[in-house]
Image: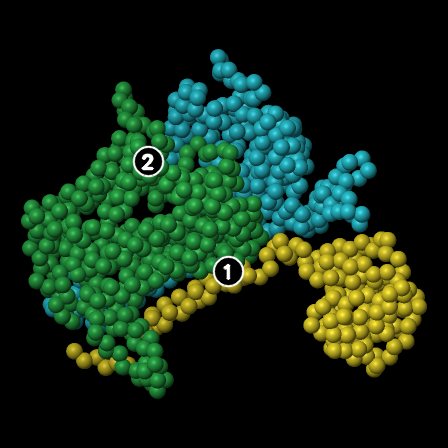
Amino acid sequence: MAIAASPEPTRRDFLYIATGAAATVGAAFAAWPFLDQMNPSSAVLAMASIEVSLAGIEPGQQVVFKWRGHPLFVRRRTPKEIAQSRAVPVSELIDPLAENANLPDSAPATDANRATKPEWLVVVGVCTHLGCTPTVSTPQNPQGDYGGWLCHCHGSQYDVAGRVRKGPAPRNLAVPVYAFTGPNKIKVG
Amino acid sequence: MAGQSTYVPKTGFTRWLDARLPILRLVSDTLTTYPTPKNLNFWYTFGGILAFMLGVQIVTGIVLAMHYVPSADLAFQSVEQRIMREVNYGWLIRYIHANGASMFFLAVYIHIFRGLYYGSYKAPREVIWLLGVLIYILMMATAFFGYVLPWGQMSFWGATVITSLFSALDQVIPHLGSAITTWLWGDFAVGDATLNRFFSLHYLVPFIIAGVVALHIWALHVPGNNNPLGIDVKGPQDTVPFHPYYTVKDAFYLALFVLVYAAIVFYAPNFFGNPDNYIQANPLVTPTDIVPEWYLLPFYAMLRSVPQKLIGVLVLVASLATLVFVPWLDTSKTRSCRFRPIMKQLFWLFAADCVLLGYVGAQTADAAWHLGDITLPLVWLARLGTLYYFAFFWVLMPLIGWFERAKPLPESIAQPVLAKV
Amino acid sequence: MRFAFPLAGVVLSLMGIAVAQDLSQPVPPKPMNWSFEGPFGTYDRGALQRGFQVYKEVCSACHSLNMVAFSDLAAPGGPGFSEAQAKVIAAGYKIPAEPNDRGEIFDANGNRLTRPGVLADHFPPPFANEQAARAANGGALPPDLSLIVKAREGGPDYVYSILTGFVKPPHGFKVQEGKYYNEHFAGRNISMPPPLNNGSVTFSDGTPSTIDNEARSIVTFLAWASEPNLEARHSIGLQVIAFLVLLCGLLFLSYRRIWHGGRQDAAARDRPGSTTEKH
C-alpha cells in the first residue's frame, strides 16, 4: 500500500500543529501568574503613595520622609535661595534636563521646572552617581559650595534646586510624581 | 532496552554535542525511539502524570517560598495574608500547591495499585519497585513537613502527634524516645525551631525525590516496561516507539488529569482541606479531632487500631516495611492479575480495604456505628482492615502463588485479538 | 434533581429533629443558598455593603478583622466602594500612631496616640492584645473574623446558624453561668451574647433590618473577607476549564490519529497482524 507523502501539510498535520499551538499558548498563559507573582504585591503598592504634611517646616529647613524605600527630601526654600537658583543659566548645568516626573522628559532644568511652587522643593534623596544619601547644607553646617547638598561618598554637589553642580554624579536629583492635595499637604507617588 | 542506542546525530552541532555530552542521545533513547509495549492502557499513564506533578509542586513550592516566612510568629500571616491576599496570583499558586499534594498522592496510589495488579514488581523489575517504595516514603515525609508550614491548628497538632510517636521508644530504652523527640523538635514541644527545620527539609526532600525518580526511570529502562498481559516483549512486533505513540497518549491523559485538577483548584479548593487549619496554631488549645490529610488516613487508622502506643508505631512502620518485601512475597510465576482469577479478587478486596481504613482514619477515635441495638466501634473495623492488610501481603501473596491455577497466557503481545479477561 | 433540595431539606430536618433530641450535640447548620455558592457564584454587592455596616456597627466592638485592608473595600470582587469612599471610611478609623518626634506613643492622659487611617491600613483590632480581649469578655476570646467562614465546618451555613441560633433553651436544659444558649454551637453554651436583633442596624439601602437580613449580610461580608478572590477564581477557572476541554479534544483527536491512522489507513488497520491493533 503506497501512499505518497504529500509535501504540503495535510489535514493530519494541521491537527498536530493546532494541538501543539494550543498547548504552547496554554503554557504561556499558565506561566504568566508565576512571573507576575514577583511583581510588587498589593501591600507594597499600597505604600507606593504617601501623603506628607508640610506643616511646621520652617524656611531653610529640610525634612526627610521615607518613600518607596528611599529618603525623600522636602525642603522649604528661602526667597534668597529661590532668587539665587533662578539666576543660574541652564547652560552652566552639568545636567540640563529637569528630571521632573511631572513634566515631559525634555523639559529644561530651570528652577521653575524643579519646584512648581517655588517655596517647596521635593526630590528623591538618592545621589544619581551610585545611590548614597547626600547631606543637606544649612547655614550653620554648610555642605559643598552651592548651598544644596553634598554627597560624602564621592564628592558630588547639588544646588538649592537639587541640580548637580559638581560630579561625579551625572544627573540632577529626581523630582518624583507629586501634587498638592491641600495648602500644606502633598501626595507623593 | 539497555545498550541499543539508535540515535544518529544529523547536524554538525548535534554531532559536536553528542561527542561531548550525549544528552540529545539520552533524550532520543529514553523518550523518542524507546521501544514500549504497544498494549499499555490508561493505567500506565500515571508515571508521566507523576513526573509532571513533581514538577508542578517544585515550581509552585519555590515560588511560594519567595513569600513565605518560616517563623512561628509570621508563618500563618505570611500564607493567609501575604500570599493569599497580597501577592499577585498568590491565592492561585497556593491552591495549586496545596491541592497538588492531593493530586500527587491520588496519582501515586493509582500508579502503585497498577504495579500490584499487573505484577510490575516481579523479576526483573524488583529494583524499580524498591525505588518506588522509597519515593513513596519520601513523598509522605515531604507532605508531612509541608502541612506543618502554614502553622494552622492542624499543622501544629498533627506535627505534635506524629513526632510524639517516637516517644514510644521510651518503652524500649528509657529516655531514648524523649531524647529523639526533643532533638527533632529542637525544643520541649513543637515550636519555632521545629517549623524552621521542617521548612528546610520540605524544600530539600523533593529534590531527593527527583534524584530517586531518575534512578527509578533508569531502572525501568533496563528491562523495559511491563504491560497488561504481563508477558515479555519478544521483538519489535510487540513494541512501538515511545514517540509519537506514548507521548501523545500520555499528553492526552495528562490533560484530562489537569482538567480534574483545575476543577478542584478553581471550584473546590478547600475540599481536601480541614477547616481547623484556617485557625492559627495554638499550643494551649487542642482541636476536637486531629486528622491528617486524606492520603495518610489508612496509616492513621492502622496506628490507632492498636491500643498500645509502641505496638501501634511498630504496626505503622511494618505496614510500610512490608512493601519492600512484595517482590519476594508473591510466589506466582504469572505476572498480571488478568490471568490470576483468585489474586484478582484479593487485589480488589485489598483496594477496598485501603478505602475502608481511610474512612475509619477520618472518624474520631471513639466513633461507632449504631445498627439497631448493636454498637460497633469503628476501631474494630480498623483492626479487621489492618489484619487483612498484613494478611494480603504476608499470607495470601505467598500462598496464592503456589495454589492458584493461572489462566493460559497469550503467545505474545502482538498476537491478534485475545479476549480481555 | 428537582426533588434534590426539598428532599435534602426533609432529610436534614429529620436529622436535625433526631439530633436535636440529643442535647449534648449541636443541631446541624441550617442549609442555606448563597449567591457565592456554586461554580458561577459571585458576591452580592448590596449584601457585602450591608454586611460591612453590620461588622462596623456590631461585630467590631469585640471581633478584629486583621487581614482585611481598607483598600480591599474598593478592590474588584469586593463590596464595590469607590477608592474615594474607601479613603473616607479609612480616615474614620483611629490607627495607633508611630512614635512622635519626642518618641512618645501616649498623650498626657495616657491614651494611645492615634492617626487617621489610610487605604493601606488594616482594620484595627478592638483590643490591644489577647489578654485585654479576654478581660473584656469574661475570659473568652472573640476570634478574629478574617477567615471565620473557612475556619468552621459548615462554612457560611454554620456562621449564619450561630447568629440565628440564639433560641429559647428547651425545657430542663441548664445554661452555664455567664454563657448563652445557642442550639448550633458545640455543647450549646456559647460565650457570645446574641449580637443581632431586629433593628440593630439601619440599612442605608432600605433593606428591612430583621435578624435574618442582618445575618445574611454579615455572613456574605465575612465570606468575602475569608475569600476575597472568589470572583476572580471562578472567572479564571471558567477560561481554564474551557481551554482544557479544547486541548483535551485536540489531544484526543491527535491520539486517535496517531494510533489508528486516518481514513486511508482504516483498511490497513483492520488487516490481521497489523502493528496498531488494540488488545
Judge left or right: residue B70 versus residue B228: right
Judge left or right: residue C239 versus residue C266: right
The quadrant of the picture occupied by the N terminus of chain C is top left
Which residue shows up at 75% across the image and 62% down it?
A72
Tint applied to chain C in the drawing: cyan
Q: Quadrant of residue B4?
A: bottom left
Check chain identity for marks 1 and 2: say if they share one: no
Q: Helix or strand or loop: what does disc 1 sit on? A: helix
Would you name the residue on which mark 2 appears?
B171
- Chain rendered green: B
Q: Residues within 10 Å of mark 1 (few under 14, many from 20)?
A: some
Q: Could you say where residue A42 lies in the image, as x and y percent from the top left?
A: 61, 55
Q: Amino acid at mark 1?
A: Pro
Name the colour scheme: by chain
- Chain rendered yellow: A
Q: Which mark is residue A33?
A: 1
B141 in relation to A116, above or below: above
Q: Amino acid at mark 2?
A: Gln
Q: Quadrant of residue C277?
A: bottom left
Q: Could you say where residue A106 lies in the image, as x and y percent from the top left?
A: 75, 77
Instruction: Give B30 or C41, whichever is nearer the viewer.
Output: B30
The quadrant of the picture occupied by the C terminus of chain C is bottom left
Q: Which mark is residue C129?
A: none
Which residue shows up at 25% across the image and 69% down it?
B242
